[in-house]
Image (cartoon, rainbow, N blue to C red):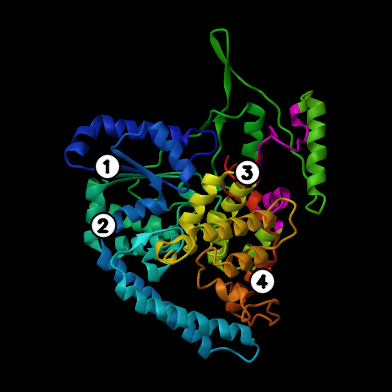
Amino acid sequence: MVAGAGSGKTTSLIKGLASILAIHGERLRLRRQRVACITYTEIAAGEIWADVGNNPLVHVSTIHSFLWSIARGFQQDIAAWVANRIDERIGELQHDAANFGPRVQQKTRDKNVRDIVRYEQQREAITRVRSFTYGAGSDYAKGILGHDDIIKMASQLMIHRPLFRTLVAQQFPFVFVDESQDTFPVVVEALLAVERQEQARFCLGFFGDPMQRIYPTGIGTVPKPDDWRTIPKPENFRSPTTVLNLANAIRSDGDDLVQVGGRKEKNGKQEVPVVGTARLFVLPMDAHRDERVAQVRAWIANANDDELWQPAAENDPVKMLVIVHRMAAKRMGFGDLYAALNDKAPEAFKNGFLDATAWPLRPLVSFLLPLAEAVQDGRDFDTMRLLRLHSPLLAKANLQGVNVAERLNQLQAVSNQVGELMGPQSQATIRDVLTLAKESRLMEFDPRLSPYLEDVAVNEPEAEDNVEGEGEEDPSNEINSMTAFLACPANQLRPYQAYVNEESPLSLSS
């Protein structure tokens, strides 16, 4: 199903799930099977889960969680995949080292050596891992696979293992993919491989709109096999007629989809179209965009005699849809953070920035920022809960023979410092916050992060020119990106997290 905004794609998906349960529910229950509905974000999964009434026959989750649910029982295969992945990375790094040219700086060479040593240590450590689990970011030595690992590993199992494809179909004979335009191409390939093999034993459906793709990693248009059915849904139930006409005009150069209908309202016994108004403002793309948007809102407020259009510093009633993350970052006050982890940054940083899973961000958004907010709000219980969860200083093994009261006082003092450094008016950088956390042993550090805070860390960006053929995975890109990241104001993390959690007036979904 390919349909535009306001057409009720999710409503159709929910009705489809209800029909499956009505027709096949008893058989699914007897065979201990479920219907899978997978989407891109936890927020979308939660909304669908509520719509299906929390039915135990329906498995609603993100793509990552779905893939892990079907792969986690194959621990030997996972261990073999991790070992092979580590060997691949070592081989890639050794190949890079052997082909470094004279313009490659020593900082890049040193990073290459550190990375090889780290992966060799992980290769040795995984032999002691009893079972692998799924977390926000990978830590092979501890048996943790990250988001990217799950996508690659589970998809490869589906693509290359006929038995695995059979088991997927036996466990989930119906799979619906919501917002399919944002699904990873390799996941689409894997699911199509299951469908080709299992045929009538497996029902696969994609619901989406390529023109609404948000994430650059998404497939956009899902290729339709010849024997598949396309379900047209040209109606738009959300937009007034004038808005619908404008949307169709904008979309006309994108694909052949033309939406019809539009929002209607009761007029006596009849339903009549809501005409509405639509105004298109074309503004220069320069440094004055925010000022011009404020002028546009003031003009609309006057033209519509509606003061709610006026810009508001707090609790803004206007929801703004942005199609470029940089615009949102600038308007919300985390432009430096966006640039650091996106401009010529490694792909892992770019992709992980969209959901706060990039490894440089994780200690900050999962621990240090929540800790700072708990301290600032005087929530002592939450402060202690976070410290017990993340700080090695409160680990049982590290409390033997220690004056616990003094240790708690020490942690309270450090937590207060973190709160000050990450306050809205603070001038501290992310480097300042992480350095405090490292020197005070407040948390365990990712081995990739520590070198950037030590003497061997990069304090100036790489100045070498890119050699022709070098791409975004050039080692110097991580060095430059980390240098910029550590120099970012720490107070930009708060608006960034609000944006990622969809708690801001700016939205990336229609």
Q: Are marks 4 and 2 in contact (CB under 8 Å)?
A: no
Cα separation, mark 3 vs mark 1, equals: 43 Å
Instruction: Tell us which disc is closer to us: 2 or 3.
Output: 3
Residue, disc 3: 377
Q: Using the image, determine if residue 270 lies above or below residue 92.
A: above
Residue 272 quadrant: top right
Q: Residue 127: percent from the left, percent from the top?
A: 30, 75
Q: Residue 397: percent from the left, percent from the top?
A: 40, 66
**Residue 483: image tag:** 4
Q: Secondary structure at mark 1?
A: loop
Q: Using the image, determine if residue 132 lies above or below residue 272.
A: below
Cα separation, mark 2 vs mark 1, equals: 16 Å
Q: Which residue is rendered at x = 71% and y = 80% of the image?
A: 463
The magenta segment is 308-335
* N-term-proximal mark, 3 vs 1: 1
Q: Amino acid at mark 3?
A: Asp
Q: Where's the N terminus, which quadrant?
A: top left
Q: Amino acid at mark 1?
A: Arg
* N-term-proximal mark, 4 vs 3: 3
* N-term-proximal mark, 2 vs 1: 1
Q: Residue 449: percent from the left, percent from the top?
A: 55, 71
Q: Which residue is rendered at x = 76% and y = 25% of the image?
A: 306
Cα separation, mark 2 vs mark 3, equals: 50 Å
Q: Amino acid at mark 4?
A: Thr
Residue, disc 1: 34
Q: Secondary structure at mark 2?
A: helix
Residue, disc 2: 165
**Residue 387 left/right relative to 459:** left
